[in-house]
Amino acid sequence: MQSSESNPNIKSYLHLSHIRTEADNTIDSTTLKIDYASFEMLWLGGDLTYYTSKEEKTLAYVDSIYQLGNPKTLWALGNHDYSNKPLIQKYTHRPPYYAYHQQGITFLVLDTQDSLSNITGPQKDLFMSVTDTLEESSHLVILHHKLIWMYGDTLLEPKISSISNAGLGDCFVCLNPNNFYKELYAELVKIKQKGIEVICIGGDIGTKTKAFEYRTPEGINFLASGIESGESGNKALVFKHDLDRKKITWSYQLISAL
C-alpha cells in the first residue's frame, strides 16, 4: 500500500467496514474494485465476511486482498469476524487489541467484542497506558467496531436504532451498555487538552446509514463508516494527512469512485 499523491507529504488512508455479504465467505464485489495501492494505510472496521475466521480458507481469501499481516493494515474485529481469534492472530501477527504508531499518529485498535462493548482488564490497562503517556503524537486515532460512544450520551443514545447496525441490548451482536463514558472518555479529553486531536472511528454501520460524524463539546471526533452489500450509494471514509501541517481531514466518498 502506498499513497499516490503527487505531494509525498500528503498521505491517504482508507476506512472500510461491514463489507460482508450474506454468504459465508464473500466480500462485497464493489469494494474489490477499489485501488488499494493508492492508500498509505487501510483501516478495517470489522465484519469483513459473514464468518471471517470460521474456516481458514475464508481468512486466507481476506488476507489475499487486505494483507492482514501488513503493519499498515489495521483491523478492529467485529462480531462476524470473531469465530477463531487464534487463527486471526496467525494472519495478523498481532493480538486483538494493540497500539501502533505511524507518521505522527498513535493508533489504538480496540476489541469491542472482548467484554461485550466494555473495555476492561488488560485492554483497559493498554488504553490507560497509552493515554497516560501520550505526548509527541499530533493525533490519537481509535479504531473499533461497536459504536460504544453512543451509549450513555443523552444526544446520541436515542439515535442508536437509526445509526448502529446493532441495537442496544444484552447479546453478543448487540451494542451493549458499556463503560466508555464512566472510565475512558475523560482520558480522551485530557489528550485533547494537550493539543492532540482525538478521532474515534466505529465500523458497525451500513445497514441503516452509510456515514456518521459528530464532534463532542469537548472536541472529540466520533466517526463511523460501513456499507450494506448490494446497495447503491455505499461510501467509504477517506482521510488525508498533511505531514507538514500535522493535519488530518476526512470525507465520505462513493466506493464506485475509489
Image (tube, rainbow, N blue to C red):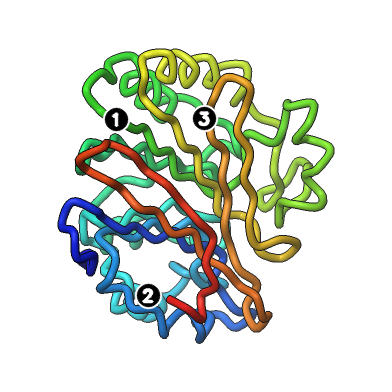
Query: Of marks 2 and 3, which one's residue comes earlier in the chain?
Result: 2
Q: Is residue 21 left or right of residue 155?
A: left
Q: CA distance from mark 1 to mark 2?
A: 32 Å
Q: Residues within 10 Å of mark 2 (few under 14, many from 20)?
A: many
Give the amino acid at mark 1: Ser
Mark 1, residue position: 138
Q: CA distance from mark 3 to mark 1?
A: 24 Å
Point out the residue furthest to the left here: 8
Please state which of residues 220 and 92 is positioned toward the viewer in this rendering.
220
Question: Of discs 3 and 1, which sits in the foreground?
Answer: 1
Location of mark 3 (residue): 119
Identify the image quadrant of the C terminus: bottom left
Which residue appears at 71% of the width and 51% of the height? 164
Left or right of 155 on screen, residue 100: left
| Looking at the image, residue 58 lies above or below residue 105 | below
Which amino acid type corresponds to the residue marked 2 in the rendered image? Val
